[in-house]
Amino acid sequence: THHPVPKKRYTFVIYLALFHVAFVVLMGFFSKYDLSNKNGTSNSSGLYAILFHFCFIILFALFTKYDPIYGQSQVPGLYAMFMDVHSMMFIGFGFLMTFLKRYGYGAVGLNFIIAAFVLEWSILVRGWLEAGINGEADFTINIKSLLVADFCAAAVLISFGAVIGKASLSQLIVMATFEVVIQGVNELIGLHYLQAYDVGESIYVHVFGAYFGLAVSKVLQGTREIESTKESSHYHSDLFAMIGTIFLFLYWPSFNSAVAVDEGQTRAIINTFLGIASSCVATFIISLLVGKGRLNMVHVQNATLAGGVAVGAVADMQIEPFGAMIIGTVAGIISTLGFQFLTPTLNETVVHDTCGVNNLHGMPGLLSGIASAIVAATATRENYNGNRLYVFYPSRTPMSNSTEYSNFSLDLTEFSRGGMGRTAAVQGGYQMAALAVTLGMAIIGGIITGYIMKLPIIEQIQDIEEMFDDEPNWLTPEDYSLKLTE
Amino acid sequence: THHPVPKKRYTFVIYLALFHVAFVVLMGFFSKYDLSNKNGTSNSSGLYAILFHFCFIILFALFTKYDPIYGQSQVPGLYAMFMDVHSMMFIGFGFLMTFLKRYGYGAVGLNFIIAAFVLEWSILVRGWLEAGINGEADFTINIKSLLVADFCAAAVLISFGAVIGKASLSQLIVMATFEVVIQGVNELIGLHYLQAYDVGESIYVHVFGAYFGLAVSKVLQGTREIESTKESSHYHSDLFAMIGTIFLFLYWPSFNSAVAVDEGQTRAIINTFLGIASSCVATFIISLLVGKGRLNMVHVQNATLAGGVAVGAVADMQIEPFGAMIIGTVAGIISTLGFQFLTPTLNETVVHDTCGVNNLHGMPGLLSGIASAIVAATATRENYNGNRLYVFYPSRTPMSNSTEYSNFSLDLTEFSRGGMGRTAAVQGGYQMAALAVTLGMAIIGGIITGYIMKLPIIEQIQDIEEMFDDEPNWLTPEDYSLKLTE
Amino acid sequence: THHPVPKKRYTFVIYLALFHVAFVVLMGFFSKYDLSNKNGTSNSSGLYAILFHFCFIILFALFTKYDPIYGQSQVPGLYAMFMDVHSMMFIGFGFLMTFLKRYGYGAVGLNFIIAAFVLEWSILVRGWLEAGINGEADFTINIKSLLVADFCAAAVLISFGAVIGKASLSQLIVMATFEVVIQGVNELIGLHYLQAYDVGESIYVHVFGAYFGLAVSKVLQGTREIESTKESSHYHSDLFAMIGTIFLFLYWPSFNSAVAVDEGQTRAIINTFLGIASSCVATFIISLLVGKGRLNMVHVQNATLAGGVAVGAVADMQIEPFGAMIIGTVAGIISTLGFQFLTPTLNETVVHDTCGVNNLHGMPGLLSGIASAIVAATATRENYNGNRLYVFYPSRTPMSNSTEYSNFSLDLTEFSRGGMGRTAAVQGGYQMAALAVTLGMAIIGGIITGYIMKLPIIEQIQDIEEMFDDEPNWLTPEDYSLKLTE
């Protein structure tokens, strides 16, 4: 059963090569270092980069304005958290998907190339979007840019989980190319225009990634039923997958708190720690019950993490430790039940979801979005020690000409230029709006991307025999063909 | 050989579910965030939490006193070290125990649920103990609380190592429930009442966890001899175990230095680094000698780490680099010899110790305790640059009305209210006392807990065939039954 | 095929034991803690240590001068990065080499003992070299000493990659003993005398380690052709190797930036991140092309990382993001082509290179060295915002009596005592000189060390049957002998 290599795979190579070269060129034109130590606050860089390519001397005469802070490193604060998130992308997602007994190379290897491709592409896309918002011609790169690129990779890798084993390399890179743009635009709408807050990216990454991936899977699959004996695990492939699970579990507090500020960061760490521990406990309980007294590795590998997703959008808010635990517990229950009862049915009737991303990212993400609306709609100045409320809900800062503005003794240094003066209920509504917009963008974007991935120019996987199998994509070692007969 | 699921397993599910729900409720009643940036220094919170449940408005009017420092995150200092320790619990302990060829799911999976359960439970238990000492009604949670919960998990996971493969899920959770309380009380006695210092938790975690687990194992086992062909490794299960070993090796300096202060933290890192490297070198030397020229994976996986344990209780002290190396070397030798000669004998005659925790945690921990007494008994003001002595041995701070107090120009800001004025020899005695109390608490607590675990209401593993085997607890993949015949 | 244990292995045990004891004794005589919080800046300690061994009281009366800063920890800045690098040594290198189907214990186990041995030995060697330069009698240990020890371990572990499976334990420890000294002397010549900068150690560690190892391999091999069916992978051994690959990929930004300063550290992180992502993308492109549409695990495990090496020597320089990407891309291409075409030929005709270190460390390191010369030769005051140039190229600081010195308003606090006043071109020449010296020292040092390793007193591996096989060195489990027939 040696599968011949389809000619179209070379189209993919050309595609990947062209894109990579384009990325390098585009980086040359548009990106500069941001060497300030103010993590994530981008400085005004004007038209520097265009001038740069015409005139080095003028550029560097202007350089001090572009980046006024020398003699400092951005490392101490953000870098360790970025590294934790970085590990989640490559070790966490990569190994989590190695549970497939004959797709281990694909899981960790294709995860590797997709993530690396997305890191490059998303720095450009996010840079352009940010430059566009700020009316600038180029953008700067700092540690936070790398972190945001990892978040963006998370969305694509979640979508990858829905289609792993069923899409060709070429299709996956095409998917990544479009998803990065659509996800970036959606997050811009949500954060910038709707001002809906989501510190742990549960809405903008988890919900988006899951339903985008499921929409793609549906389009790729059509009405075809996918049933393969290869879609299962071996004893050791399950242990490899547990490496991924544990790394995701460990570093989730960093994922949810990396961009949080001040005391919100401490809260985000504590809430995620308690929420994800709660989903772990809940998963073991439900798994034993539905497994008639036996634990199921699929649940332990996945549903244990649902609390990290579900706490995400409210992680930095004053939800109290027991609130985080309740959210995590509910997520663990929903997720385990989803893996046990929902996915087997959906796989046959609606859409095939290889890793069950609907259970780990989709439904817990929706839960998190709804929780964020409820928490926002009930947040008071009392909860947040008065003016600190406006640190976590900037949109609720009173307008500068309002009586509240002066009553609450707000000033320009702390809350610049006043705010939009939203009420709690209105903010709750905007959270729900962002969730709805995200769902819509993900599903419509995924359908369009899915049809592009089905264009005849791109390599397709036709034969179910070729699915969930490393052999079509990889040179395999001598013992590989023996493994299936075990 | 498909084992039927015992009905009593469902009792465990109810137990776990009830406890988890109880934890959530208790967190709601007793815990609050500590959002200050003073890691680990808990603020006086008075009766806030009880008022909280009656009256939100009064609570939040008082809120600024409870947590006066806003606008800051606890992250920079402690968080990275907490994450290292967190990794040791889930990756380190979890994978270290995967060496058993047919208990890999159990090693990493049961390690996962036990650790998550303990994290929740120990935050409550430690919170109550601390609140009790301070005469308060509730407690606050900060990053240090999460770190202490991980230390507590370490004790339980060490005990798990003594009984892994021989105790049911239900029994393990019962063990965790009691051990957290007894370990917490013992550490309170040692640190608060005896003022015996143990920065790396060698006494309060390693000695306690090892002998508690061995006492439990003895009670469970009774006079039954346990001999199973399943209690051995496969080639790849040994490689999985090495993941655990290496992570424990890497992050041990963080374990021993996380709660150290000032220059003591630097010393703790250097001493642990040198001590654990020394035990690694010593282990390879002894392993080759006793293995007649061949290395033994059991030694490499375990005894290499003994230096981390043995340096623990004195890691932040002025023991000099070569002192740390001598301690690590001795620990590596003792531990390797223990695995080679002691454990096989003890397993047959006294108590069965699956992972050899006596060799990795027990004896090196005792060594560390004895070292801490010697180091304490010989510590002088000269060693520690004068008054710095009292930073590392607060109990030796002269009493405020003594002549030494004024001679050494101590003042209230640096050494508040004077101290107990212990001499070096007395402090050495207290270190030995803490070690003795810990041994007693561990053994007696373990025996009592063991008998509770044998109550007929709790699922027991009767058949030696069911031991060291994932099949009774897990849904296993198709290749699992084939592995044994290999 | 049970190989008897050669008697000479016990010589190795004696060797290792003697050295370890010698290390402990030497640490006692020469090393002290550096407890200041100025990472890596060693304080003048004069003749303290010699006095120390005669007279405790005088020593400690002088102690405040030796280490004036108490009450502070070195942790926040450097420690997290040190931990990342530490992980690369033990997890990264250890697991990367587990790809050999029958040498997994050897990969991760011998990597473990070699690294631990080198950590001890290199702290001494580097301490003596530094003390010699400063005209002091002893040296201090701080967090940076541990980091430098890990860098030194990297060089030895790279050399290990060239000879893994073909050298006995005894030979490996002998190699480590000599390589640490020669590598240390070479880096001293490069950094101190030639003032050639290499922030990511591409020249002093990667080039040195690769060609030292290849020279050793050539001497060991002689004209003998090495061909073994055991020199290949299994499906799961490739997945274990990917653990190593991913950890090296993740933490490479920390490797290249750990000793960088100020804004150079931010640049080093961004450049390494982009460079290594680029080599990953380039590797997948070339691997598919040369594999006739199929990916090759050897490429994915190794060449993906070449960008980290290639960016190393210029990582903290103003090379711009797209510059880092071009360097990484070229490195990925060269490295993949090297694995595909060069190594198979070289293995048969010139020198056997088990892990292909020439492709991952050798050629990308040479590329980095050449890049460092070009970048140095084109660096201007304008690139670096004026005087900041002299932070990254201290050798270019104008001499204190020159007109430039006063024109550029340099002063004693910022650029002490003026500099050597090198021009850009001269600095470029010194970078090339350092690269040439390193190549020479590595090859000549490797040849000499190789001949020492062939001394009859040291255990040799004669039989090709014993190569790439764990059985001669380890007690192996029951399933080990079956694996080969799979």
Image (tube, coloured by chain):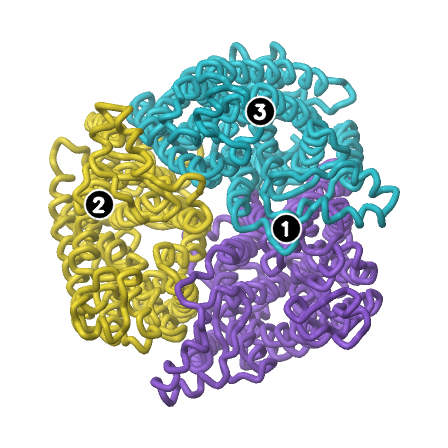
Chain colours: A yellow, B purple, C cyan
Task: Name the one closer to the observer, A191 or B114.
Answer: A191
Report helix, strand or loop for mark 1. Answer: helix
Circle 3: residue type: Leu
Q: Are marks 2 and 1 on the same chain?
A: no
The subunit carrying tag 3 is C
* Mark 1 closeness class: few <14, some 14–19, many ≥20 residues within 10 Å: many
Circle 1: residue type: Thr
Task: Name the one closer to the observer, C106 or B455.
Answer: C106
- Reading the image, the residue beneath label 3 is C191
For this view, does B183 lie left or right of residue A18? right
The subunit carrying tag 1 is B
Task: Name the one closer to the observer, B470 or B188.
Answer: B188
Q: Are marks 3 and 2 on the same chain?
A: no
Residue drawn at x 21%, y 28% is: A51
Per the rendering, the mark at residue B266 is 1
Calculate the distance from the C-alpha at mark 3 to the C-alpha at mark 2.
41 Å
Report helix, strand or loop for mark 3. Answer: helix
